[in-house]
Amino acid sequence: MGSHGNNLFGAVSSSVEAVTRPFHCDAISQQIRTFIQMRTNLKVVDNSGAKRVMCIQAKSGKYGAKLGDTIVGSVKEAQPRGKVKKGDVVYGVVVRAAMKKGRSDGSEVQFDDNAIVLVNNKGELIGTRVFGPVPHELRKKKHLKILALAEHIV
Amino acid sequence: MGGAAISSHGLACAPRGAVPPYPRSRRASAAAAAGHRSSHQLLLRSDLPAHPILCRARSQSSSSSNVNFGGGDDADKLLEDLIKQHGEVVYSSGSSPAVEADDDAECLSFAVSLAKVASEIKAADIRVLCVKRLVYWTRFFIILTAFSNAQIDAISSKMRDIGEKQFSKVASGDTKPNSWTLLDFGKFLFSDIVFPVAYLMIFCTLTGDVVVHIFLPQQRAFYNLEEFYGNATPIELPFDTQWQ
């Protein structure tokens, strides 16, 4: 966390995260990423058994879900012996978003993929471990349980 | 030695704890790396008390000649001169160990008092873990098992009371009891990094201090936090923690 600035961090699961100082976006090389909304495919990064979830609804936010928000999704792909199976309707917390999230020191966090962690409707985690990097914006959103189970915090 | 001599001549302004070792080591390494000629110059410079005027003249000339950086040695010496003349320690990294130990001791006493409260309400299997090396966002974890929602309520309300009254720490966390209830007594609960200068502040008083995990018995086995934080050092509690 301490080494902010232009650093690229490559995790084993090949989700690259870029923390950048704000600069003029080169419109040709950069793609502006937006919110997580209906029909967005997200990766599941805990060991609950699901692999991909398609968002049905963003629980909060007028335009869609951002980092740290909860969504409702339908499991599209699942591991054979897991706690959820294909076709289940589940809740999830967004832990990595391809949309830049600003921090109060002026830097922005952006990940390469959209990832969620499955939660039940009371807010309890279904899985027991979280893989890949998670940002510490989750602390402010009261998702300390995810931070406590995360393997790497950015 | 050199640092003390410099301050006695009033050349530099207030070199504090961190600065004197640094130029000395730089000087030593420069001497080791530099050639014969410059090592002579370095020896001359370390004779500081005897030649104050010489030193001042040299620094004048070197600051005026900062347009042409001759070699690496000259740049080093120039830099050292400038630091001695104008430098002052704004922040020393890591905030002297004494301050850190104080903070740690305070957090530790807070954690132990919370654990004591929990044991009075008959929570089971209380563990206090020091996760300072593993996790940057907190210092201590307290993990305990409660057996009913009412008990979880009682524990969390007592802990909040103690936090507010004795240690003036506000808890943010789960208000309704859950199978895994979490209480976060942290300092930096707002979106964390304020601005770059305060970065260094963040590193020394790194977000507070104690996070409390209250589990129901089957959830504790399910999530198995102790295994995940197996590398954390457990803290001995001065009272009986095993109720079963």
Image (cartoon, helix red, strand yellow):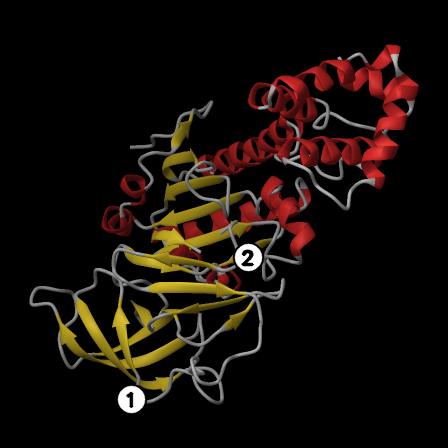
Front in this rendered view, residue A85 or B86 = B86
Q: SS class of the residue under badge 2?
A: strand
The kind of residue on which mark 1 rests is Arg
Marks 1 and 2 share the same chain: no
Q: Spatial distance from mark 1 to mark 2, Cα to Cα?
A: 34 Å
Q: Quadrant of residue A29?
A: bottom left
Is residue A80 shown to the viewer in this render?
A: yes
The C terminus of chain B sits in image quarter:
top left
Is residue B88 shown to the viewer in this render?
A: no
Can you give x and y, in whole percent of width and height, for residue B43 in the image? 72, 13
Can you give x and y, in whole percent of width and height, for residue B94 in the image? 61, 34
> Residue at the location (49% across, 45% down)?
B136
Q: Is residue B183 above or below residue B66?
A: below
Q: Which residue is mark 1?
A: A39
Q: Is residue B208 left or right of residue A56?
A: right
Task: Please report, as a chain letter, where disc 1 is located.
Answer: A
Task: Please report, as a chain letter, where disc 2 is located.
Answer: B
Q: Is residue A2 left or right of residue B131?
A: right
Marks 1, 2: nearer the viewer: 1
> Looking at the rendered structure, which numbered label has been put on residue B172?
2
> Looking at the rendered structure, which numbered label has been put on residue A107?
none
Q: Quadrant of residue B16?
A: top right
For label 1, the crowd category at 10 Å Cα-Cα, with few meaning under 14, some 14 to 19 and many 20 or more, is: few
